[in-house]
């Protein structure tokens, strides 16, 4: 297998460190807009299967040419979600397969944003499913940890743990803190604002997909391995769009364990208009300048990618499922926990970033060995779950199951 | 009396509208950095005692020349507190009197900012008191509503209501709301951040002046005329520095009725570093630019000066005094309430702005008639209170007294 990895930020760099320990591929081309980042990632793994290139992820023609030049079978997208569509189209144009860890972006409903869906996450990609299928090509979308591993858990529950599923609820929580900071998000605040202030999407079998107001249906979820109870709220997330396409469930939700303080902070930013990306005019050193308030918020906080060695605690991704097995009610939480101290010591990567990067590497290996195969635009739950979960354990990062 | 009014913003414009109804002065020169603002204020009063000029409040020489050219007796400073010192020095240089509604700025103590005072509000002005006194010239500082009327109330309480004063606590609260906005401060957010995040100052007779952490000693104060209970906290304010110089009291505090929501908002801004005036670098239309996060917060909110006709409710400034009269404990609240609907209808000025502008006009009239006279750098409490309070009532805006 020959892979083009686009994006050598935190997640892309962790992908190289995880993949370097596995024999399933011949070449991994690491391409970034900033060649120094690509070169640094390649230099760090000291493995001659890796090589660095410069590419603009928004330039479809250049990306397609790079795929062709290196004879790549597959493009792994580790950039931010704004580049999903150009990279997805570039892979198609070059006849390569495609993997990402998010999906094409949503747009709220123009009149009823907190009741009805507008353009949904992934709609633009699924609209092209026919063309991928016709050519026997595969786009595996949402293949990070959440979405990704969380979707694999949903499929596993449907296949092996339940006869009937009432509700599938992805629940994400952590107890990460950063030494020396009162407030330091462990993930991009820019993206967190985007996720949390977009109308959350919910799926119900008899109603389809619909939206609610931000921060709806708060609940306290008790996370495993010592993380404990964290306040969770509905958030727009890919699993709600993916799971119902392949798994039969009456209801699908995603709740993010932001915690009370973080929720209040996001609400305040929204109230003041500081979540906005519409520029405001302020004095600059050479006269008035127009800047995005959200960019200023991000610039005022420490960069989470640089905080790994000051961070303590664990992050947990998982899928809570309620239903019936052998005529009896059952409720389980399938989960994957990463301790930041461990991921920093073992891979030099912060826990949240490392956990995201792990899963697409496992998926690439399953595709390389033929354990997973398919065509069209597919989510992780379109494939058998057992081989994925077994290989995850083989990678040294086992998952857990809690009956509740 | 010939007056130079510097600053034709909200407060300066209200000064012209209030003064225009009074006969005590011959000329009021209205000067602003933006000549259009000065001209608009002058045009609106349609009174040939007023004339417009352009001046940079930071240019002492130009201000002194303007005072001399128009033969002004007194400079009334209606600019923001950064211009206190240049205007104070310009008045001195031209041999004119000086009035302002704030005082020279403070700087926190370098090592123990939340325990000890560094440079206090007004220190720079009081340092020059000897020179003013020697020449028989008067600088009347802190002569707005708070400081200003609140200090007059303190003097009145000492002269007429108490034999001994235990505590004088300025208490400021409002029930103003702005139609169409979830969150719209009725006063400059830039200045509010400055006031609220500076270490609050407290005076105790046996300890002198000292500071506390921001938002200290929260209490719920019940404001009169239907405003009701509002959460108040210690804030750095001029009265605490002025009152003890002329009025004997064991303790002097200033508490601002910010309300719980506003306090939480300011705490969040501080936690995120968005109160900072140290520039951060963000993408701009022509490459990276350095901007002050606090400027971006201000630019993201509506301009309070433009909100008068969408605002509802009342604002209350006042002085709570606890002590002994005729051997019996006594507690009173002396206050002044302005209803925004009334001030908009009567003067076209928003309540908070109008209430600030009213008091220096009353003081100018007392100086013009000789009811008030003095030399040096003096606060409002250095003068007899009764003539001021009587003239306030004559201006159509009476004050109140609540025994409690």
Image (cartoon, coloured by chain):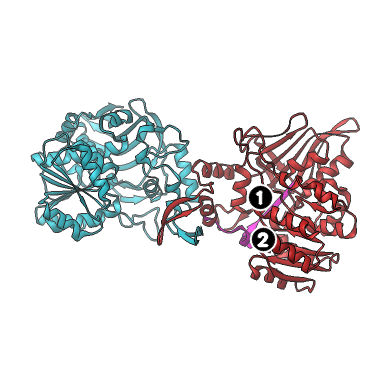
Chain colours: A red, B cyan
Between residue B214 and residue B252, name the one nearer to us: B214
**Residue holding disc 1:** A175
Work out how far the residue at label 2 is from the one at label 1, CA to CA, in angstroms. 39 Å
First to last magenta residue range: A300-317
Task: Give the secondary structure at mark 1.
Answer: loop
Which callout, 2 or 1, points at the residue further toward the start of the chain?
A: 2
Q: Is residue B388 magenta?
A: no
Q: Toward the viewer: A116 or B159?
A: A116
> What x and y, as percent, mark residue B367?
12, 42
**Which mark, residue A59?**
2
In this rendering, would B294 be left or right of A304?
Answer: left
Residue A377 seen by the camera? no
Neighbourhood count class around disc 1 (C-alpha, 10 Å): few under 14, some 14–19, many 20 upward? some
Q: Is residue A72 left or right of residue B176?
A: right
Residue at image position (38%, 51%) is B198
Q: Residues within 10 Å of mark 2 (few under 14, many from 20)?
A: few
Q: Is residue B317 visible?
A: yes
Q: Position of residue A58 (x, y in %)?
A: 66, 59
> Of A107 and B257, which appears nearest the observer?
A107
Q: Quadrant of residue B384?
A: top left
Q: Residue at x 85, y 64 (%)?
A: A1
**Residue drawn at (36%, 32%), measured in percent from left and top?**
B309
> Residue at position x 25%, y 48% from top?
B7
Image height check: is B54 above or below A36?
A: above
Q: Find residue B101 and name its label.
A: none
Viewer-nearest of labels 2 and 1? 2
Q: Are marks 2 and 1 on the same chain?
A: yes
């Amino acid at each position: 297998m020959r892979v083009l990895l686009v994006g050598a930020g935190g997640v892309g760099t962790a992908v190289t460190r995880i993949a370097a320990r596995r024999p399933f591929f011949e070449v991994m081309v690491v391409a970034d807009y900033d060649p120094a980042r690509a070169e640094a990632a390649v230099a760090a793994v000291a493995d001659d299967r890796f090589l660095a290139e410069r590419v603009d992820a928004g330039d479809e023609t250049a990306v397609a040419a790079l795929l062709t030049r290196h004879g790549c079978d597959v493009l792994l997208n580790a950039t931010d979600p704004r580049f999903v569509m150009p990279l997805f189209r570039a892979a198609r144009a070059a006849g390569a397969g495609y993997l990402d860890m998010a999906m094409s972006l949503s747009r709220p409903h123009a009149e009823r944003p907190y009741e009805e869906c507008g353009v949904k996450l992934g709609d633009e990609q699924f609209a092209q499913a026919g063309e991928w299928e016709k050519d026997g090509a595969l786009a595996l979308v949402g293949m990070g940890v959440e979405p990704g591993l969380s979707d694999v858990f949903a499929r596993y529950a449907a296949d092996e743990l339940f006869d009937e599923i009432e509700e599938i609820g992805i629940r994400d929580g952590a107890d990460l803190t950063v030494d020396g900071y009162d407030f330091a998000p462990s993930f991009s605040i820019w993206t967190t604002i985007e996720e949390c202030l977009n109308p959350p999407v919910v799926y119900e079998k008899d109603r389809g997909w619909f939206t609610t107001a931000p921060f709806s249906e708060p609940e306290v979820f008790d996370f495993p391995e010592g993380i404990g109870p964290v306040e969770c709220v509905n958030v727009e997330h890919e699993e709600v769009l993916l799971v119902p396409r392949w798994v039969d469930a009456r209801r699908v939700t995603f709740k993010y364990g932001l915690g009370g303080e973080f929720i209040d902070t996001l609400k305040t930013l929204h109230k003041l208009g500081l979540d906005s990306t519409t520029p405001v005019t302020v004095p600059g050193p050479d006269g008035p300048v127009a800047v995005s308030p959200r960019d200023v918020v991000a610039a005022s906080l420490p960069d989470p990618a640089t905080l790994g060695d000051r961070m303590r605690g664990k992050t947990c991704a998982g899928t809570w499922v309620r239903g019936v097995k052998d005529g009896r009610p059952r409720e389980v939480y399938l989960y994957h926990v990463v301790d930041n101290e461990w991921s920093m010591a073992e891979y030099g990567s912060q826990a949240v970033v490392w956990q995201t990067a792990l899963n697409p590497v496992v998926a690439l290996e399953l595709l390389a060995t033929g354990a997973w195969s398919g065509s069209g635009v597919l989510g992780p739950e379109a494939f058998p779950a057992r081989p994925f979960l077994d290989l995850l354990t083989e990678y040294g990062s086992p998952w857990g199951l809690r009956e509740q």
